[in-house]
Image (cartoon, rainbow, N blue to C red):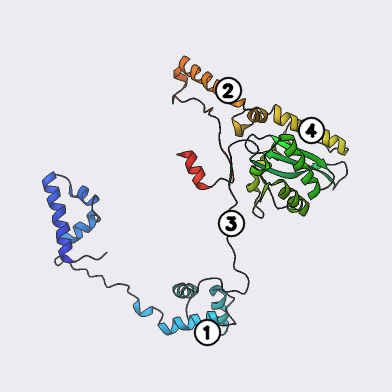
Protein backbone atom coordinates (compact mmCIF):
# COMPACT_ATOMS: atom_id res chain seq x y z
CA UNK A 1 0.00 0.00 0.00
CA UNK A 2 1.49 3.30 -1.10
CA UNK A 3 1.42 6.23 1.36
CA UNK A 4 2.26 9.88 0.80
CA UNK A 5 5.24 11.45 2.63
CA UNK A 6 2.83 13.47 4.80
CA UNK A 7 0.98 10.32 5.85
CA UNK A 8 4.27 8.64 6.74
CA UNK A 9 5.28 11.64 8.91
CA UNK A 10 1.97 11.47 10.77
CA UNK A 11 2.40 7.76 11.43
CA UNK A 12 5.97 8.27 12.69
CA UNK A 13 4.79 11.13 14.93
CA UNK A 14 1.94 9.01 16.33
CA UNK A 15 4.27 6.12 17.13
CA UNK A 16 6.87 8.29 18.86
CA UNK A 17 4.37 10.38 20.83
CA UNK A 18 2.51 7.29 22.01
CA UNK A 19 5.77 5.68 23.07
CA UNK A 20 6.87 8.78 24.97
CA UNK A 21 3.56 9.44 26.77
CA UNK A 22 2.90 5.88 27.88
CA UNK A 23 6.54 4.81 28.21
CA UNK A 24 5.90 1.86 25.89
CA UNK A 25 8.61 0.44 23.59
CA UNK A 26 8.27 1.54 19.97
CA UNK A 27 8.16 -2.11 18.86
CA UNK A 28 4.99 -2.62 20.91
CA UNK A 29 3.38 0.50 19.43
CA UNK A 30 4.16 -0.73 15.90
CA UNK A 31 2.47 -4.04 16.67
CA UNK A 32 -0.90 -2.29 17.06
CA UNK A 33 -0.52 -0.33 13.81
CA UNK A 34 -0.54 -1.69 10.27
CA UNK A 35 3.23 -1.18 9.81
CA UNK A 36 6.03 -3.29 11.25
CA UNK A 37 9.03 -2.08 13.26
CA UNK A 38 11.40 -2.51 10.27
CA UNK A 39 9.22 -0.24 8.15
CA UNK A 40 9.26 2.39 10.90
CA UNK A 41 13.07 2.26 11.06
CA UNK A 42 13.35 2.50 7.26
CA UNK A 43 11.08 5.54 7.21
CA UNK A 44 13.12 7.19 10.00
CA UNK A 45 16.32 6.77 8.00
CA UNK A 46 14.81 8.08 4.78
CA UNK A 47 15.47 11.71 3.83
CA UNK A 48 12.43 12.46 1.66
CA UNK A 49 10.00 9.59 2.56
CA UNK A 50 9.11 9.23 -1.12
CA UNK A 51 8.00 5.87 -2.45
CA UNK A 52 10.66 4.88 -4.97
CA UNK A 53 8.96 1.69 -6.13
CA UNK A 54 8.50 1.66 -9.91
CA UNK A 55 5.97 -1.11 -10.19
CA UNK A 56 6.46 -4.38 -12.08
CA UNK A 57 10.00 -4.40 -13.56
CA UNK A 58 9.03 -6.42 -16.66
CA UNK A 59 6.21 -4.37 -18.10
CA UNK A 60 7.80 -4.64 -21.54
CA UNK A 61 7.45 -8.44 -21.38
CA UNK A 62 3.69 -8.39 -21.03
CA UNK A 63 1.52 -9.74 -23.83
CA UNK A 64 0.28 -7.08 -26.19
CA UNK A 65 -3.42 -6.67 -26.89
CA UNK A 66 -2.95 -8.13 -30.36
CA UNK A 67 -1.27 -11.23 -28.90
CA UNK A 68 -4.11 -11.65 -26.42
CA UNK A 69 -6.63 -11.35 -29.25
CA UNK A 70 -4.68 -13.96 -31.21
CA UNK A 71 -4.81 -16.36 -28.23
CA UNK A 72 -8.57 -15.90 -27.88
CA UNK A 73 -9.07 -16.38 -31.61
CA UNK A 74 -7.01 -19.57 -31.62
CA UNK A 75 -8.79 -21.05 -28.61
CA UNK A 76 -12.17 -20.42 -30.24
CA UNK A 77 -11.04 -21.83 -33.58
CA UNK A 78 -12.82 -25.05 -34.56
CA UNK A 79 -9.49 -26.90 -34.54
CA UNK A 80 -8.73 -26.03 -30.93
CA UNK A 81 -12.07 -25.18 -29.30
CA UNK A 82 -12.35 -28.60 -27.62
CA UNK A 83 -8.78 -28.59 -26.31
CA UNK A 84 -7.21 -27.16 -23.18
CA UNK A 85 -4.25 -24.74 -23.35
CA UNK A 86 -2.05 -27.64 -22.19
CA UNK A 87 -2.89 -29.34 -25.50
CA UNK A 88 -3.11 -26.26 -27.71
CA UNK A 89 0.40 -24.95 -26.98
CA UNK A 90 2.19 -28.21 -27.94
CA UNK A 91 0.09 -28.51 -31.12
CA UNK A 92 1.12 -24.96 -32.08
CA UNK A 93 4.74 -25.82 -31.29
CA UNK A 94 4.53 -28.75 -33.71
CA UNK A 95 3.61 -26.18 -36.37
CA UNK A 96 6.57 -24.00 -35.30
CA UNK A 97 4.23 -21.41 -33.77
CA UNK A 98 4.86 -19.95 -30.30
CA UNK A 99 2.75 -17.16 -28.87
CA UNK A 100 2.87 -17.64 -25.09
CA UNK A 101 3.10 -20.27 -22.38
CA UNK A 102 0.21 -22.44 -21.19
CA UNK A 103 -0.18 -20.34 -18.05
CA UNK A 104 -0.44 -17.18 -20.17
CA UNK A 105 -3.13 -18.84 -22.29
CA UNK A 106 -5.06 -19.70 -19.13
CA UNK A 107 -4.63 -16.18 -17.76
CA UNK A 108 -5.90 -14.53 -20.96
CA UNK A 109 -8.91 -16.85 -21.15
CA UNK A 110 -9.70 -16.20 -17.49
CA UNK A 111 -9.50 -12.41 -17.97
CA UNK A 112 -11.83 -12.65 -20.98
CA UNK A 113 -14.31 -14.86 -19.04
CA UNK A 114 -13.67 -17.71 -21.47
CA UNK A 115 -12.17 -20.21 -19.07
CA UNK A 116 -15.34 -22.29 -18.99
CA UNK A 117 -16.65 -25.49 -20.52
CA UNK A 118 -15.98 -25.16 -24.28
CA UNK A 119 -16.55 -28.72 -25.45
CA UNK A 120 -19.55 -30.06 -27.34
CA UNK A 121 -20.23 -32.47 -24.49
CA UNK A 122 -22.71 -31.56 -21.79
CA UNK A 123 -21.39 -29.39 -19.00
CA UNK A 124 -20.72 -31.27 -15.76
CA UNK A 125 -23.55 -30.58 -13.37
CA UNK A 126 -23.26 -30.24 -9.63
CA UNK A 127 -25.09 -32.97 -7.79
CA UNK A 128 -28.09 -31.83 -5.85
CA UNK A 129 -28.00 -32.28 -2.11
CA UNK A 130 -30.30 -35.05 -0.91
CA UNK A 131 -33.59 -34.15 0.69
CA UNK A 132 -33.39 -33.82 4.47
CA UNK A 133 -36.12 -35.23 6.71
CA UNK A 134 -36.65 -35.01 10.47
CA UNK A 135 -38.37 -37.63 12.59
CA UNK A 136 -39.69 -36.54 16.00
CA UNK A 137 -41.69 -39.73 16.61
CA UNK A 138 -42.15 -43.22 15.21
CA UNK A 139 -43.64 -43.87 11.76
CA UNK A 140 -42.47 -40.60 10.23
CA UNK A 141 -39.34 -41.62 8.30
CA UNK A 142 -38.49 -45.16 7.21
CA UNK A 143 -35.57 -46.32 5.08
CA UNK A 144 -35.19 -49.65 3.34
CA UNK A 145 -32.77 -51.67 1.26
CA UNK A 146 -31.94 -55.21 0.11
CA UNK A 147 -28.86 -57.22 1.06
CA UNK A 148 -27.44 -60.57 -0.03
CA UNK A 149 -27.48 -63.82 1.98
CA UNK A 150 -25.20 -66.71 0.94
CA UNK A 151 -26.76 -69.77 -0.63
CA UNK A 152 -25.42 -73.29 -0.94
CA UNK A 153 -25.15 -72.75 -4.70
CA UNK A 154 -22.12 -70.67 -5.68
CA UNK A 155 -23.06 -67.48 -7.52
CA UNK A 156 -26.68 -67.51 -6.27
CA UNK A 157 -28.06 -65.63 -3.30
CA UNK A 158 -31.14 -65.11 -1.20
CA UNK A 159 -32.25 -61.51 -0.85
CA UNK A 160 -33.15 -60.01 2.52
CA UNK A 161 -35.50 -57.02 2.33
CA UNK A 162 -35.42 -54.80 5.44
CA UNK A 163 -37.26 -51.62 6.50
CA UNK A 164 -36.09 -49.57 9.50
CA UNK A 165 -37.75 -46.65 11.30
CA UNK A 166 -34.97 -44.09 11.82
CA UNK A 167 -36.59 -42.63 14.98
CA UNK A 168 -36.91 -45.76 17.11
CA UNK A 169 -34.60 -47.99 14.97
CA UNK A 170 -37.22 -50.75 14.88
CA UNK A 171 -37.17 -53.11 11.92
CA UNK A 172 -40.72 -52.55 10.76
CA UNK A 173 -40.76 -55.00 7.87
CA UNK A 174 -38.66 -57.79 6.37
CA UNK A 175 -38.77 -60.77 4.05
CA UNK A 176 -36.33 -63.18 2.41
CA UNK A 177 -36.82 -63.99 -1.28
CA UNK A 178 -35.02 -65.73 -4.11
CA UNK A 179 -35.12 -62.66 -6.35
CA UNK A 180 -35.40 -58.89 -6.24
CA UNK A 181 -38.81 -57.60 -7.24
CA UNK A 182 -40.72 -54.33 -7.08
CA UNK A 183 -43.91 -56.26 -6.32
CA UNK A 184 -42.35 -58.15 -3.40
CA UNK A 185 -41.04 -54.86 -2.01
CA UNK A 186 -44.48 -53.25 -2.37
CA UNK A 187 -46.10 -56.17 -0.50
CA UNK A 188 -43.54 -55.83 2.31
CA UNK A 189 -44.24 -52.11 2.72
CA UNK A 190 -48.01 -52.70 2.76
CA UNK A 191 -47.65 -55.40 5.43
CA UNK A 192 -45.36 -53.16 7.53
CA UNK A 193 -47.84 -50.27 7.42
CA UNK A 194 -50.69 -52.53 8.59
CA UNK A 195 -48.59 -54.15 11.30
CA UNK A 196 -47.43 -50.83 12.75
CA UNK A 197 -50.69 -48.98 12.23
CA UNK A 198 -48.73 -46.15 10.65
CA UNK A 199 -50.37 -42.95 9.44
CA UNK A 200 -49.09 -42.99 5.88
CA UNK A 201 -49.99 -39.35 5.19
CA UNK A 202 -47.00 -38.37 7.37
CA UNK A 203 -44.66 -41.18 6.31
CA UNK A 204 -41.50 -40.81 4.22
CA UNK A 205 -39.90 -43.93 2.72
CA UNK A 206 -36.28 -43.51 1.61
CA UNK A 207 -34.21 -45.94 -0.45
CA UNK A 208 -31.45 -46.16 -3.04
CA UNK A 209 -31.99 -46.13 -6.81
CA UNK A 210 -32.24 -49.86 -7.43
CA UNK A 211 -34.80 -51.50 -9.70
CA UNK A 212 -37.10 -52.80 -6.93
CA UNK A 213 -37.04 -49.37 -5.28
CA UNK A 214 -38.04 -47.42 -8.40
CA UNK A 215 -40.18 -50.07 -10.10
CA UNK A 216 -43.67 -49.17 -11.28
CA UNK A 217 -45.46 -51.55 -8.88
CA UNK A 218 -43.65 -50.02 -5.91
CA UNK A 219 -44.34 -46.48 -7.12
CA UNK A 220 -48.08 -47.16 -7.60
CA UNK A 221 -48.36 -48.81 -4.17
CA UNK A 222 -46.66 -45.92 -2.39
CA UNK A 223 -48.87 -43.42 -4.20
CA UNK A 224 -52.00 -45.34 -3.17
CA UNK A 225 -50.85 -45.45 0.44
CA UNK A 226 -49.95 -41.75 0.37
CA UNK A 227 -46.32 -42.40 1.30
CA UNK A 228 -43.70 -39.86 0.23
CA UNK A 229 -40.83 -41.60 -1.61
CA UNK A 230 -37.28 -40.23 -1.67
CA UNK A 231 -34.07 -41.68 -3.10
CA UNK A 232 -30.30 -41.56 -2.73
CA UNK A 233 -28.15 -39.52 -5.00
CA UNK A 234 -26.62 -41.79 -7.68
CA UNK A 235 -23.72 -43.86 -6.30
CA UNK A 236 -23.92 -42.29 -2.83
CA UNK A 237 -24.69 -44.99 -0.29
CA UNK A 238 -24.26 -42.60 2.67
CA UNK A 239 -27.62 -41.04 1.81
CA UNK A 240 -29.17 -44.23 3.22
CA UNK A 241 -26.87 -44.57 6.23
CA UNK A 242 -29.43 -46.12 8.58
CA UNK A 243 -30.02 -49.12 6.35
CA UNK A 244 -26.28 -49.48 5.66
CA UNK A 245 -25.57 -49.43 9.41
CA UNK A 246 -28.28 -52.03 9.99
CA UNK A 247 -26.72 -54.34 7.38
CA UNK A 248 -23.33 -54.06 9.08
CA UNK A 249 -24.87 -55.06 12.41
CA UNK A 250 -26.63 -57.95 10.67
CA UNK A 251 -23.49 -59.28 9.00
CA UNK A 252 -21.26 -59.02 12.07
CA UNK A 253 -23.83 -60.22 14.61
CA UNK A 254 -22.67 -63.29 16.53
CA UNK A 255 -25.58 -65.46 15.42
CA UNK A 256 -24.88 -64.78 11.74
CA UNK A 257 -23.88 -68.14 10.21
CA UNK A 258 -20.47 -68.27 8.63
CA UNK A 259 -21.62 -70.77 6.05
CA UNK A 260 -24.33 -70.61 3.42
CA UNK A 261 -28.05 -71.15 3.96
CA UNK A 262 -29.26 -74.52 2.69
CA UNK A 263 -32.81 -73.38 1.91
CA UNK A 264 -35.10 -70.37 1.73
CA UNK A 265 -36.90 -71.59 4.86
CA UNK A 266 -33.64 -71.70 6.82
CA UNK A 267 -32.70 -68.19 5.70
CA UNK A 268 -36.19 -66.84 6.54
CA UNK A 269 -36.10 -68.44 10.00
CA UNK A 270 -32.70 -66.96 10.74
CA UNK A 271 -33.83 -63.50 9.51
CA UNK A 272 -36.90 -63.70 11.78
CA UNK A 273 -34.73 -64.50 14.79
CA UNK A 274 -32.39 -61.66 13.93
CA UNK A 275 -35.26 -59.15 13.68
CA UNK A 276 -36.62 -60.33 17.04
CA UNK A 277 -33.19 -60.00 18.67
CA UNK A 278 -32.57 -56.60 17.07
CA UNK A 279 -35.91 -55.09 18.11
CA UNK A 280 -36.17 -56.60 21.59
CA UNK A 281 -32.64 -57.22 22.89
CA UNK A 282 -30.11 -55.12 20.96
CA UNK A 283 -29.02 -51.99 22.89
CA UNK A 284 -28.69 -49.51 20.04
CA UNK A 285 -25.94 -46.89 20.26
CA UNK A 286 -27.91 -44.39 18.18
CA UNK A 287 -30.73 -44.19 20.75
CA UNK A 288 -28.65 -44.12 23.96
CA UNK A 289 -28.31 -47.88 24.33
CA UNK A 290 -31.94 -48.87 24.74
CA UNK A 291 -33.69 -51.42 22.56
CA UNK A 292 -35.69 -50.25 19.54
CA UNK A 293 -38.92 -51.60 21.06
CA UNK A 294 -38.27 -49.75 24.33
CA UNK A 295 -37.89 -46.57 22.31
CA UNK A 296 -41.04 -47.35 20.29
CA UNK A 297 -43.11 -47.92 23.43
CA UNK A 298 -41.68 -44.82 25.17
CA UNK A 299 -40.07 -46.87 27.95
CA UNK A 300 -36.69 -45.30 27.20
CA UNK A 301 -37.73 -42.06 28.95
CA UNK A 302 -37.79 -43.67 32.40
CA UNK A 303 -34.76 -45.85 31.64
CA UNK A 304 -32.60 -42.87 30.62
CA UNK A 305 -33.82 -40.79 33.54
CA UNK A 306 -32.90 -43.59 35.96
CA UNK A 307 -29.43 -43.88 34.41
CA UNK A 308 -28.86 -40.12 34.71
CA UNK A 309 -29.86 -40.16 38.41
CA UNK A 310 -27.61 -43.15 39.06
CA UNK A 311 -24.61 -41.36 37.56
CA UNK A 312 -25.32 -38.20 39.56
CA UNK A 313 -25.46 -40.21 42.78
CA UNK A 314 -22.20 -41.93 41.86
CA UNK A 315 -20.53 -38.56 41.27
CA UNK A 316 -21.85 -37.20 44.59
CA UNK A 317 -20.54 -40.27 46.38
CA UNK A 318 -17.02 -40.05 44.92
CA UNK A 319 -16.60 -36.63 43.24
CA UNK A 320 -12.83 -37.05 42.84
CA UNK A 321 -13.43 -39.62 40.10
CA UNK A 322 -15.35 -37.09 38.01
CA UNK A 323 -12.65 -34.60 37.06
CA UNK A 324 -14.83 -32.40 34.83
CA UNK A 325 -17.86 -32.69 37.15
CA UNK A 326 -19.89 -33.87 34.15
CA UNK A 327 -21.61 -37.24 33.97
CA UNK A 328 -22.41 -39.25 30.85
CA UNK A 329 -25.11 -37.61 28.75
CA UNK A 330 -28.26 -39.72 29.09
CA UNK A 331 -30.60 -37.11 27.61
CA UNK A 332 -33.16 -38.59 25.27
CA UNK A 333 -32.68 -37.92 21.54
CA UNK A 334 -35.87 -36.16 20.50
CA UNK A 335 -35.12 -35.50 16.81
CA UNK A 336 -33.49 -37.84 14.31
CA UNK A 337 -32.34 -36.56 10.92
CA UNK A 338 -32.06 -38.27 7.57
CA UNK A 339 -29.32 -36.52 5.53
CA UNK A 340 -28.84 -33.79 8.09
CA UNK A 341 -28.24 -30.26 6.75
CA UNK A 342 -25.44 -28.02 8.04
CA UNK A 343 -27.86 -25.70 9.85
CA UNK A 344 -29.31 -28.71 11.69
CA UNK A 345 -25.83 -29.75 12.78
CA UNK A 346 -25.04 -26.20 13.96
CA UNK A 347 -28.36 -26.07 15.81
CA UNK A 348 -27.48 -29.22 17.76
CA UNK A 349 -24.02 -27.95 18.61
CA UNK A 350 -25.20 -24.54 19.84
Relative side of 34 to 161, left or right: left
**In the structure shown, which secondary structural element does the residue marked by tag 2 occupy?**
helix
* Residue to which mark 4 is pinned: 272
Residue 178 appears at what percent x and percent y?
Answer: 85, 45
Mark 1 nearby-residue class (10 Å; few <14, some 14–19, many ≥20)? few
Residue 228 position in % (x across, y down):
66, 48
Q: What is the total number of numbered labels drawn onto the structure image?
A: 4
Q: Earlier in the sequence, mark 3 or mark 1?
A: 1
Mark 3 or mark 2: name the one nearer the start of the chain.
3
Considering every residue shown, the one lying at the far top of the view is: 317
Mark 2 nearby-residue class (10 Å; few <14, some 14–19, many ≥20): few
Disc nearest the viewer among 3 and 1: 3
Q: Determine the image quadrant of residue 111.
A: bottom left
Quadrant (top left, top right, bottom left, bottom right) of the N terminus: bottom left
Q: Residues under labels 4 and 1: Cα distance?
A: 75 Å
Image disc number at residue 97: 1
Percent across and percent down for residue 30 are 22, 52
Question: Disc 2 versus disc 1: distance between alpha carbons?
Answer: 81 Å
Instruction: Mark 4 vs mark 1: give the one in front.
Output: 4
Distance from Cα at disc 2 to Cα at disc 4:
29 Å
Disc 3 element: loop
Within 10 angstroms of label 4, few (less than 14), some, or many (20 or more) residues?
Answer: some
Q: Position of residue 31 (x, y in %)?
A: 24, 50
Q: Which residue is mark 3?
A: 128
Q: In the rendered view, does 137 fall on the left or right side of 210? A: left
Give left or right: position of 83 versus 104. right
Quick check: marks 3 and 2 in contact, CB under 8 Å? no
Identity of the residue drawn at 48% across and 41% down: 347
* SS at circle 4: helix
Q: Which residue is mark 2?
A: 302
The earlier-in-sequence mark between 4 and 1 is 1
Badge 2 or badge 1: first in the primary sequence:
1
Amino acid sequence: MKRSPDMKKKIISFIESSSGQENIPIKNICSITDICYKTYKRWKKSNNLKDNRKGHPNLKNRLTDSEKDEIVSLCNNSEYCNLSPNQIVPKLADKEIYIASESSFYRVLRDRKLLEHRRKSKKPSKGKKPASHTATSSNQVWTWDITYLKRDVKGLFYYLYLIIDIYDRCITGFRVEENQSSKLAADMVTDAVLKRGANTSNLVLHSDNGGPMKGSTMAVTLDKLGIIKTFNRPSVSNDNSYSESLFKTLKYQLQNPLGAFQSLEEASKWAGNFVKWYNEEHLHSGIKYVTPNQRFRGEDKDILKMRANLYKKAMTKKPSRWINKITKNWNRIESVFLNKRKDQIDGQLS
